[in-house]
Image: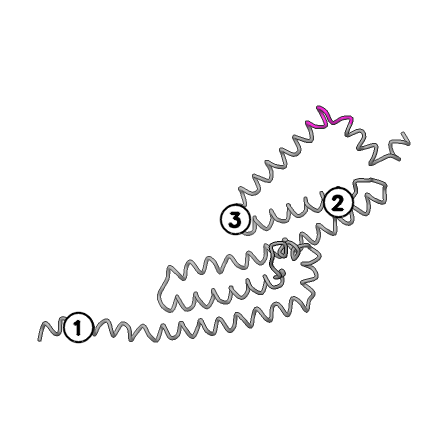
Amino acid sequence: MQDFEVIVDPLRAFMLQIGAYLPRLAVAVVVLIAGWLIAKTVRFAVVKALRALNFHVLTERAGVDGFLQQGGTETDTTDVFGVVLYWVVILAALIIAFNGLGLQQVTDLLTRVLLFLPKLLVGLLVIIVGSYFGRFVANVVHTYLQNVGISDAEVLGRIAHYAIVVFVVLIAVDHLDIGAGLVQQTFLILLAGIVLALALAFGLGGRDWAARLLERWFPRQRGDD
């Protein structure tokens, strides 16, 4: 009889643990299903609202949609915003479910991911607005230089555009905290190398070329002298 109790008691304790765990598991499943339904609703509502506000026009003019489509996808930036918010809700539901099950390590990991997604949205928004502003500045520079008779107006407009885009990307990376220091240092090294190369070109062998370039850019001013 004692041998039988030795075998039955652990089994009874195990069954009691399962019985106590099943309600928590059922609640976790309900939370996940509700989170999935809410996530789909949020994604649909956000995409519809952004398209109603013509957000897709802004991203298209900024060139971000074209960049995404070069990768072979038909998804635009508005859909990306919807997907990111979809996963925000899904992760929140997962955190609640795993926290109810007592899986603290999984909850901590998912919390870190959840806190990163809003930063990703802000960084993407910074890149979109910055790219749109860069194109606007490039058009202004191109138009002005073309009106004053500078033949390389298009090239200089593109340089202004790329400079603004690089600056905006650095701001976005700094906001995301993903190797921001390394990216900034690399950018400064490249910028210093370009400046040094231009200085050497002008100082050692580019004086005649610079003179011809200035003559081509500012013929009226030099002709008046």
Direction from residue 221 to residue 205 in the image, left or right: left
Query: Given the image, on which type of amino acid does mark 1 rest?
Result: Asp
State the residue position of label 3: 178
Q: Between marks 3 and 1, how big is the CA–CA gap?
A: 53 Å
Direction from residue 219 to residue 132 in the image, left or right: left
Mark 1 and mark 2 in contact (Cβ < 8 Å)? no
Q: Residue drawn at (66%, 30%), measured in percent from left and top?
A: 197
State the residue position of label 2: 157
Mark 2 and mark 3 in contact (Cβ < 8 Å)? no
Q: Secondary structure at mark 1?
A: helix
Badge 3 local density, few (<14 within 10 Å), some, or many (20+)?
A: few
| Span colored in magenta | 200-208
Query: Given the image, on which type of amino acid does mark 2 rest?
Result: Gly
Q: Is residue 67 above or below residue 202?
A: below
Q: Earlier in the sequence, mark 3 or mark 1?
A: 1
- The residue lying furthest to the left in this view is 1
Direction from residue 155 to residue 65 in the image, left or right: left
Q: Secondary structure at mark 3?
A: loop
State the residue position of label 1: 9
Q: Position of residue 121 (x, y in %)?
A: 58, 58
Q: Earlier in the sequence, mark 3 or mark 2?
A: 2
Q: Is residue 94 above or below residue 126?
A: below
- The residue lying furthest to the right in this view is 224
Q: Earlier in the sequence, mark 2 or mark 1?
A: 1
